[in-house]
Amino acid sequence: MLISEIKRVIEQVSRDKGIERHVLVKALEEALKSAARKKYGPKIDIEVQYSEESGELEVFQFKEVAETIEDDMMQISVEEGRQLDPDCEIGDSLGTKMDTATFGRIAAQSAKQVIIQKLKDAEKDAVYTSFIDRKGEIINGIVQRIDRGDIIVNLGQTEGALPVREQVPKEGYRRGDRIRALILEVLHESRGPQVVLSRTHPAFLVTLFRTEVPEISEGIVTIMGASREPGVRAKIAVASNNSDIDPVGACVGMKGSRVQNVVQELRGEKIDIIPWHVDTAKFVCNALAPAEISRVIIDEDNRSMEVIVPDEFLSIAIGKKGQNVRLASKLTGWHLDVKSESIYNQAMQSGYNSLMALPGVGISLADALYEKGFYSAEEISKSSVADLLQIRGIDEQLAASLIEAGRIQAEKEAAEMAEAEAAEAAEAAAEAEAPVSEADPAPEDAAGAEAPVGEPSEPAGQPENEA
């Protein structure tokens, strides 16, 4: 089939859609095969060839040379075959060029559907190939429409989707607005947009700093981690491999210019830039700044830390609605339990008292247990005989008796605590259910209820004019 425009169409579609030419040619060949089978049945043996020079698509039908014809669509007689090829023999396959004009309207419609579907698949493959290597980059686009809360962004070659979960709550966009976002994911098989964008991911913050700070892109300053509560606050940890370069100062920039550019892009989100430290405890203290830290108790097994702060810094360390400690925990990867010094000292005193309550434990032994990290009877109950034998003055018999006594003491304290909590809950429930009588006087009115109206409740003094 000679189609004068087909070569030009292939080149234009390939250029506009970014699809390889051989993919388009294959789609056309598949379409013509589909059209032929639609017209003549699925058993027909055909082959489609495209000529790059002439832009011609030719369809050839192949038939087997047979002595007896059983299916004229699949077989050809010896006489007819020798008219095409004088040297043919029975069993040979001969091809004849078909006139595609005989395919008919239905077959042409079927071919059109195949072409459309193949083009869609090829376009998706081209988009996937183009964007999969750009995952993690920041891309600019224009808001095209909003679909059920998701923002559909025109990226030029294709559309991207900014889902509701990846949008900063305070931000609002209209059609035609310019938007910057992180390429979070590229989907290969998708009915909707294949490129998923994000403005809430911590990697968006990291990539913005990499764009603004030359020392980061050059590898002098390294971003060790980032955590965000999108639209409110973020923390980013940085380190430098050059002692002459201050990583925090490099990220802040002259008069705060670099960090302010990032803050403006994030619509006012506050950013804490924290110096990373190889010592985990020191890193946690940096992450909780500006709060001062009195001491840090590390539990390596559970990857948690108990952070003790002065009473006046407790609210600062925790932050508004726990924001500061939550971000610090995400940044460091450790579970942080922040306590004030007064509560910590009270708990330690209570634990020391529970040690003293154990039979056979005096002040000296309690101090020895305390120094070895056994701060309460509950911790004694969870220890082993081998652990306690490391303490001077304890033999196997005493260690076993201490563990048993500690278990009994811990169970007793747990029962007392549960009883107290139940009593408090019952008291609160009773107060909530108690009826309030309208006839009862208010407490502040009760004091003056007995004094007659218009008379002083206290004796009057002498008149001023009494001489």
Image (tube, rainbow, N blue to C red):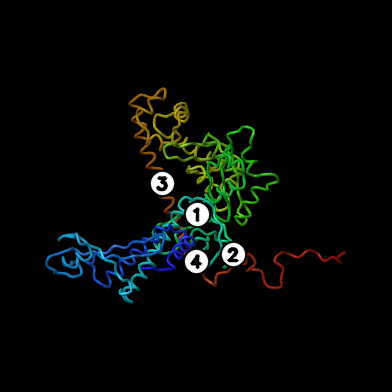
Hey, which quadrant is residue 382 in on the image? top left
**In the figure, 232 relative to 10: above or below?**
above
- Which quadrant would the C terminus be assigned to in this image? bottom right
Is label 4 in contact with label 3 (beta carbons under 8 Å)? no
Task: Report helix, strand or loop for mark 1.
Answer: strand
Where is residue 68? Give x, y as percent: 11, 67
Residue position for label 1: 183
Residue position for label 3: 416
Task: Report helix, strand or loop for mark 4.
Answer: loop
Task: Report helix, strand or loop for mark 2.
Answer: loop
Is label 4 in contact with label 2 (beta carbons under 8 Å)? no
Within 10 Å of disc 3 (Cα), the crowding (few <14, some 14-19, many 20+) is: few
Report the residue that reaches farthest toward the top.
392
Q: Choose the circle earlier in sequence order: 1 or 2.
A: 2
What's under tag 4, amino acid-wise?
Gly
- Which quadrant would the N terminus be assigned to in this image? bottom left
Cα separation, mark 2 vs mark 3, equals 63 Å
Cα separation, mark 4 vs mark 1, equals 19 Å
Foreground residue among 16 and 55: 55
Residue position for label 2: 177
Residue position for label 4: 149
Q: Choose the circle earlier in sequence order: 4 or 1.
A: 4
Task: Report helix, strand or loop for mark 3.
Answer: helix
Foreground residue among 398 and 375: 375
Within 10 Å of disc 2 (Cα), the crowding (few <14, some 14-19, many 20+) is: few
Where is residue 361? Give x, y as percent: 42, 29
Q: Residue at x 62, y 32 (%)?
A: 243
What's under tag 2, amino acid-wise?
Asp
The answer to whether residue 258 shows anywhere in this view is yes
Where is residue 427? Give x, y as percent: 46, 58
Q: Choose the circle earlier in sequence order: 4 or 2.
A: 4
